């Protein structure tokens, strides 16, 4: 019986059509599988990033609940100091703009010297 089916004149065209349909469906699904694999890798990367940021947030939360944080805030905002502690304040210089009214720093010295010369020349 199987030998008769394999030798029939309809077996070869039907087998070719079935193989063609299976091949076409496989060719259509390959890009979809690739896209799904890339999306899964992207989602896994996002999960790892979220886990890392969650761990960092937990660490920050633990620090905010700690006595060290409370002491630091008391020192900064309430000027707290321990009885046997000496406190020093270090102030940063604020940047002075070098260009005022269109005069640059190199021109500023020249203009000052010119004004001084003019005042010395015409003062009585």
Image (spheres, rainbow, N blue to C red):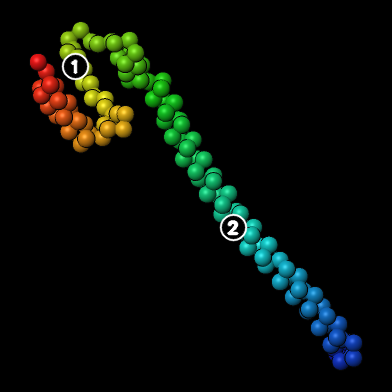
Residue identified by numbered label 2: 38
Q: Is residue 102 above or below residue 68?
A: below
Q: Is residue 53 above or below residue 100?
A: below
Horizontal side, residue 96 vs residue 9: left or right: left
Per the rendering, the mark at residue 88 is 1
Q: Quadrant of the C terminus?
A: top left
Q: Is residue 119 above or below residue 13?
A: above
Q: Who's the residue at 28% across and 10% down the image?
A: 80
Horizontal side, residue 1 vs residue 16: left or right: right
Q: Nearer the viewer, residue 8 or 22?
A: 22
The secondary structure type at the circle numbered 2 is helix
* Spot occupied by residue 73 in the image (x, y as percentages of width and height): 35, 16
Q: Nearer the viewer, residue 118 or 3?
A: 118
Q: Who's the residue at 50% across and 40% down the image?
A: 51
The secondary structure type at the circle numbered 1 is loop
* Spot occupied by residue 62 in the image (x, y as percentages of width and height): 41, 25
Q: CA distance from mark 2 to mark 1?
A: 57 Å
Q: Who's the residue at 29% across and 11% down the image?
A: 79
């Amino acid at each position: 019986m199987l030998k008769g089916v394999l030798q029939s004149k309809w077996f070869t065209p039907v087998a070719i059509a079935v193989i063609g349909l299976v091949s076409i469906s496989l060719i259509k699904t390959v890009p979809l599988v690739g896209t799904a694999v890339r999306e899964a890798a992207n989602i896994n990367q996002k999960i790892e990033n979220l886990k890392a940021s969650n761990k960092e947030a937990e660490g920050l939360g633990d620090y905010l609940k700690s006595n060290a944080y409370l002491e630091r805030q008391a020192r900064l905002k309430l000027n707290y100091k321990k009885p046997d502690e000496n406190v020093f304040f270090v102030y940063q210089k604020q940047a002075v703009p070098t260009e005022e009214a269109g005069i640059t720093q190199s021109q500023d010295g020249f203009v000052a010297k010119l004004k001084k010369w003019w005042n010395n020349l015409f003062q009585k």
